[in-house]
Image (cartoon, helix red, strand yellow):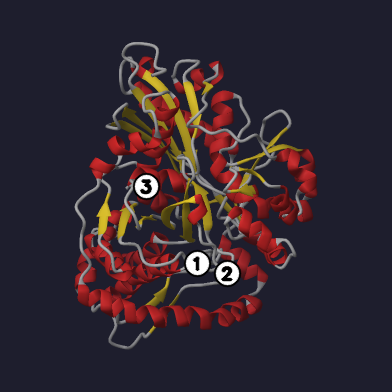
């Protein structure tokens, strides 16, 4: 072990989500010791913009760490390492001096949609996909940089480096500009070599901007020391080793059990977005013909995750609950989001399965998995006069299950077991729907903060607390998996029949989405996105989801 001082027995994992930043303390065997969280803020603007302040994000991160440290006497002296992960995709530009000169473009930002459409028809698009294993969409830094190069080239002319969220926080913690192999590979590289790829960069039209891409640093092999400035801001000791984690999607899946050595196991994170992953060896990846999904590296030799992601998961439930809350408020006192969430299982029990089809494309930025369409929108099918709110809510929940099945179908056969994480996994009714839709038993990982745990696991390997990631998984993850919950056979048969109608309908609806988008006034589109500099109204709901 590299831990040089007696009593140095804590690893801090930082998980910087879109609306909440958490600092979580673990002992060297993976037991969670404490957590501190700070709300993070982002803003919507015209044309589908979604931005976040780099300085505010660092201040929030430092505050979360400081609050965690201050709760325990002598805590800072016990910290063996820190590791940081964060929201994926997006573009966090810094100048040549390392300081931000513009707000970050988040993964929620839709401004690159025209550029994505142009690049998808380019001559090198299939070669780009075969190298990265990742479908091009508006979330990604490659698409956003390509759009900036055409629409606002002055931004790139002033920039010194293009980072992701966790990379920006790593820069603030260590003074080192770097990115990790996972985001580097699925955005600009090759998942087989874990390095940048010239053909990919050319396909994006960014060969002239390659200097903006930072060096790639593997946080399981190398750490950087915490600077004196960061120590003063966080309350930690200067020189504490800092590991750069992989992107939050794969860190959460790692902490929740996506890779424990069992065959045909999958892991879904059902939070604000839906992330559906299966772990395979890099030579076993089967790329689809539609150029969709992600291939994201695991911090283990030759292991990757095949991924399909729904742009919105529990955001659909939040929308339905807001409808109920608005109606209740019309005739009585307002109820909290938490009170409405507590009623979900009861409403589900008072509704008939499979009566409605709902496509959960509630995001203003459309859908990205298992198909890519910025104009995709949510809809109900099968409504009649007899349906009531519990039926609508069940339809929404079943829509999440159908979307989950749709994503796994794009990656091959259904998994033999589905492991769940995210706040929605706490709902027995939702777990039953997901299990029946996929036709596999579900298991919930008892790990409360899977994303931070995944990052901390990387640091524990980097400092020598474990010889390998597999050894770390055996102690940090496997013992925390709950017993399997088997699917209801009748429900599984019903959902298997309904799935064919669900998939047929979403294919047939595509022309309708585009016709509606073409006839929608631009002013209405910008109004729907919200005025610039207005706080995102879903921040509190997202915070509740991520905290859960």
**Residue 486: x and y, percent?**
20, 63
* Disc 1 to disc 2, C-alpha distance: 11 Å
Residue 248 place in picture, x, y as percent: 46, 44
Q: Residues within 10 Å of mark 2 (few under 14, many from 20)?
A: few
Disc 3 designates what residue?
Answer: 259
Query: In x, y percent, where is residue 285?
Result: 50, 57
In which quadrant of the rendered view does residue 332 lie? bottom left
- Between 333 and 538, the residue placed more toward the observer is 538
User: Front-most of 77 and 325?
Assistant: 77
Give SS at disc 2.
loop
**Which is nearer the N-term, disc 3 or disc 1?**
3
Residue wearing tag 1: 370
The reply to whether residue 533 is visible in this rendering is no
Mark 1 Cα shell of 10 Å, populated few (<14), some (14-19), many (≥20): many
Percent across and percent down for residue 497 are 33, 82
Name the secondary structure under disc 1.
loop
Q: Which mark is residue 507?
A: none
| Comes first in the chain, label 1 or label 2 | 2
Element under label 3? loop
Residue 164 horizontal side relative to residue 281, left or right: right
- Residue found 29% across the figure and 69% down from its top: 439
Residue 405 seen in the current view: yes
- From the image, tell me which residue sits under label 2: 289
């Amino acid at each position: 072990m590299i831990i040089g001082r007696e009593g140095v027995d804590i690893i801090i994992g930082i998980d910087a989500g879109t609306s909440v930043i958490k600092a979580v303390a673990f002992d060297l065997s993976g037991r969670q010791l404490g957590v501190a969280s700070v709300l993070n803020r982002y803003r919507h603007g015209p044309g589908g913009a979604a931005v976040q302040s780099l300085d505010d994000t660092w201040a929030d991160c430092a505050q979360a760490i400081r609050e965690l440290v201050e709760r325990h006497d002598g805590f800072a002296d016990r910290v063996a390492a820190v590791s940081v992960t964060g929201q994926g995709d997006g573009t966090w530009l810094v100048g040549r001096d390392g300081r931000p000169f513009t707000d970050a473009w988040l993964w929620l930002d839709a401004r690159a949609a025209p550029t994505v459409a142009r690049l998808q028809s380019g001559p090198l698009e299939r070669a780009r996909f075969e190298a990265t294993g990742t479908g091009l969409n508006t979330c990604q830094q490659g698409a956003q940089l390509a759009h900036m190069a055409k629409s606002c080239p002055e931004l790139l002319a002033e920039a010194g480096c293009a980072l992701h969220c966790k990379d920006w926080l790593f820069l603030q913690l260590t003074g080192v500009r770097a990115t990790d192999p996972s985001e580097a590979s699925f955005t600009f590289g090759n998942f087989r070599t874990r390095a940048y790829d010239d053909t990919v960069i050319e396909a994006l039209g960014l060969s002239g901007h390659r200097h903006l891409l930072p060096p790639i640093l593997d946080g399981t092999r190398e750490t950087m020391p915490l600077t004196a400035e960061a120590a003063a801001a966080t309350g930690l000791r200067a020189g504490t080793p800092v590991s750069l984690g992989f992107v939050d999607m794969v860190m959460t899946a790692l902490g929740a059990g996506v890779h424990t050595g069992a065959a045909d196991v999958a892991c879904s994170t059902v939070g604000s977005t839906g992330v559906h992953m299966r772990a395979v060896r890099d030579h076993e990846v089967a790329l689809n013909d539609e150029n969709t999904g992600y291939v994201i590296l695991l911090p283990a030799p030759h292991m990757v995750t095949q991924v399909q992601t729904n742009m919105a998961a529990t955001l659909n439930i939040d929308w339905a609950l807001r409808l109920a809350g608005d109606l209740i408020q019309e005739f009585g006192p307002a109820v909290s989001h938490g009170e409405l969430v507590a009623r979900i299982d009861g409403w589900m029990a008072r509704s008939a399965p499979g009566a409605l089809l709902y496509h959960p494309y509630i995001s203003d930025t459309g859908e990205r998995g298992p198909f890519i369409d910025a104009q995709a929108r949510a809809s109900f099918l099968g409504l009649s006069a007899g349906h009531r709110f519990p039926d609508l809510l069940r339809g929404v929940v079943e829509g999440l299950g159908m979307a989950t099945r749709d994503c796994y179908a794009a990656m091959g056969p259904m998994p033999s077991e589905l492991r769940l994480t995210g706040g929605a996994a706490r709902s027995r009714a939702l777990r039953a729907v997901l299990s029946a839709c996929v036709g596999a038993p579900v298991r919930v990982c008892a790990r409360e903060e899977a994303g931070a745990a995944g990052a901390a696991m990387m640091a524990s390997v980097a400092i020598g607390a474990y010889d390998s990631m597999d050894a770390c998984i055996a102690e940090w993850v496997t013992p925390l998996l709950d017993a399997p919950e088997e699917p209801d056979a009748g429900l599984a048969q019903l959902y298997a029949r309904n799935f064919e109608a669900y998939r047929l309908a979403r294919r047939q609806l595509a022309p309708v989405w585009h016709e509606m988008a073409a006839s929608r006034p631009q002013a209405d589109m910008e109004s729907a996105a919200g005025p610039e500099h207005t706080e995102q109204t879903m921040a509190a709901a997202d915070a509740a989801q991520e905290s859960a």
